[in-house]
Amino acid sequence: MDLRNATIAIATDNGTTVSSHFSRARYYAVIYLVDGKVIGRERREKAVYHLFASQKTGRNQGNDRGASQARGRGAVSFPITDCQAVIVHSMCRRTFDYLSEVSVVPVLTNLHTIQEVIGAIAAGSVHQNARWARQHQHGQR
C-alpha cells in the first residue's frame, strides 16, 4: 500500500508514539504527506475517548454500551473520514471492518513512534501486520 501521497491518521496518546489500541487512544495525529514528505500535521480529538477513560477510572464501571453505540454510529471515525488510512497497533474486528466500509484503510503496525511510521511510509515500506490483524478480532486479545 502506497501512502506517500495521502492524509493519514495515527492513533496516539501523546503525539509521539503509536497507541496500542485504537479505541483507547486519546487523539489522532493527522499527517499530510506529498511524495513521502510531511507538509502538514495536526492533532484531532477522539470523539469517544472520554467513555473509555471513565471506564479505566471506574466512573462508568461495567458500562461499555455507550462506547459501543458511539462506535457503531461512526463517532470514533468521524474526525478522520478525510484520511485515507489510520495506523495503530491493534483494534477490534468490528472497528476494522467499519473503517474499511467508510474507505479509511486500517493499518495495524508494530512500529512504535509516529516518526518511525512516517519514515516507513516515505520508504514505501509500511505494511499491514497480518498476524496482529488476525489476533485482534472482536472479543479476542
Image: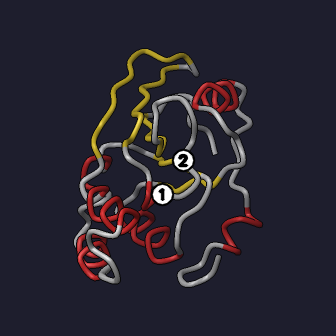
Q: Is residue 102 above or below residue 93?
A: above
Q: Dot 1 lies on which element? A: helix
Q: Which residue is mark 2?
A: 19
134 left or right, relative to 51: right
**Which kind of residue does numbered mark 1 sit on?**
Phe
- Density class for disc 1 (Cα within 10 Å; few <14, some 14-19, many ≥20) is many
- Density class for disc 2 (Cα within 10 Å; few <14, some 14-19, many ≥20) is many
Residue drawn at (23%, 76%) of the image: 66
Nearer to us in this view, 119 or 51:
51
Residue drawn at (54%, 47%) of the image: 19
The spot of residue 61 in percent (x, y) is 32, 77
Residues at discs 2 and 1 in contact (Cβ within 8 Å)? yes
Residue drawn at (29%, 72%) of the image: 67
Q: Is residue 13 above or below residue 56?
A: above
Q: How many marks?
A: 2
Q: Dot 2 lies on which element? A: loop
30 left or right, relative to 130: left
Residue drawn at (61%, 25%) of the image: 115
Q: Which residue is mark 1?
A: 22
The spot of residue 16 in percent (x, y) is 53, 29
18 left or right, relative to 133: left
The spot of residue 91 in percent (x, y) is 53, 65
Nearer to us in this view, 86 or 24:
24
Colour setting: secondary structure
Q: Is residue 35 above or below residue 104?
A: above
Q: Is residue 111 above or below residue 120?
A: below
Nearer to us in this view, 102 or 91:
91
**Which kind of residue does numbered mark 2 sit on?**
Ser
Compute the Cα span from label 2 to label 1. 7 Å
